[in-house]
Image: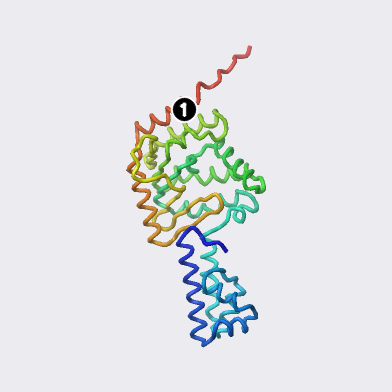
Amino acid sequence: MATSPSSSVQKAREAIAARLREMRLDAGLTVESLAELCGWNKSKSSRIENTKTLPSDADVRAWCAACEVSDQAADLIAASRSAESMYVEWRRLNRTGLRRGQEGRVPLYERTRLFRIYCANIIPGLLQTEAYATALLSAITEFRGTPNDVTDAVAARLSRSRVIQEGNHRFGLLIEEEVLRHRMGNAATMRGQLEYLLTMMSLPRVALGVIPFTADRHMWPVETFSIFDDEQVSVELVSAAITVTAPSEINLYARAYAELQRLAVYGPQARALIRAAVDALGEPPQQTATS
């Protein structure tokens, strides 16, 4: 099993492995004797203790039974499942399409009071128009080869995004200027999306910052991430979604957000960058009058 790029995940797995090892030692068992009791090769016990293999539910139950602490199996299984859910491959998360992933985050969005979101490549989901979201989710569906439920997934995303106009929420959103120039869909789609940004940034609860091409950088562009209060961070990679819950790592992402925020421009300066991106799309086609 490949090591996760998130140390939060690895720390969680290491804690489970350490607890299993303690159980084995407390029971006076060697790696070999435990493997014999569990009915597997001793190398499997070593792989589990060294976090090379994440134990299955059955593995945990067998381990606890061999150590005569079966009453601890349920808690360890819960911890193991939690560690596994921190790093989820998109192909597993989206095996039935994209809609469920959009709907599954609704409770998190509803309970979050402060959103801090940084995007280096696309418009943040909370600010996407229907046309832009359709173009993006269609591209994702094709790339990942997942079942095509784009229409339903877009509807779910737009429904989820209503938190930006409802409830007691605040939104800090940062985008790199190149996001304004990455043409997702056609020119009309991008024009509508950029005009929508201009509308949404006028909301009092929304602080939209744009990091200019010309910014003298003391903080490099990083992966897209979202901070939900101080509860968790979601990070999107090409292959997987990562959930970070370790306080030290949440603080690190909060620090990264603060540093990136220092590079951003807001208000009239941000509007000027968005308007320039609109102008770069050229004039919209003239509609021909019909008689």
Residue 84, quarter of picture = bottom right
- Name the one closer to the observer, 280 or 204: 280
Q: Which color scheme did the rendering employ for the protein?
A: rainbow
Q: Quick check: 108 above or below 137?
A: below
Residue beneath the point at 59% across and 42% down:
137
Q: Residue 263, relative to residue 80: is it above or below?
A: above
- Indicate the position of residue 173 as horizontal and vertical percent values: 41, 43
Instruction: Work out which quarter of the rendered image holds the N terminus and state it.
Output: bottom right
SS assignment at label 1: helix
Q: Amino acid at mark 1?
A: Val
> Vertically, is 263 above or below 192?
below
* Residue located 46% across and 34% down the image: 180
Q: Relative to 39, is 11 on the left or the right?
A: left
Mark 1 Cα-neighbour bin, 10 Å: few <14, some 14–19, many ≥20? many
Work out which residue is located at the far bottom of the displayed protein and give it: 28
Q: Residue at x 52, y 86 (%)?
A: 27
Quadrant containing the C terminus in the rendered view: top right
How far from the left and from the top, in percent, is residue 116?
40, 48
Judging depth in this view, the residue of 30 and 110 nearest the camera is: 30
Q: Is residue 246 above or below residue 104?
A: below
> What residue is shown with label 1?
278
Apparent side of residue 240 relative to residue 174 in the rendered image (left or right)? right
Return the x and y of residue 264 as percentages of the image width and height: 35, 39
Estimate the x, y position of residue 71 in percent, counting from the top left.
Answer: 54, 81
Query: Is 272 left or right of 239, judged from the image as shown?
Result: left
Please state the total of marks drawn on the protein image: 1
Specify the quadrant of the image occupied by residue 245: bottom left
Q: Which residue is depicted at the point 60% across and 70% down? A: 56
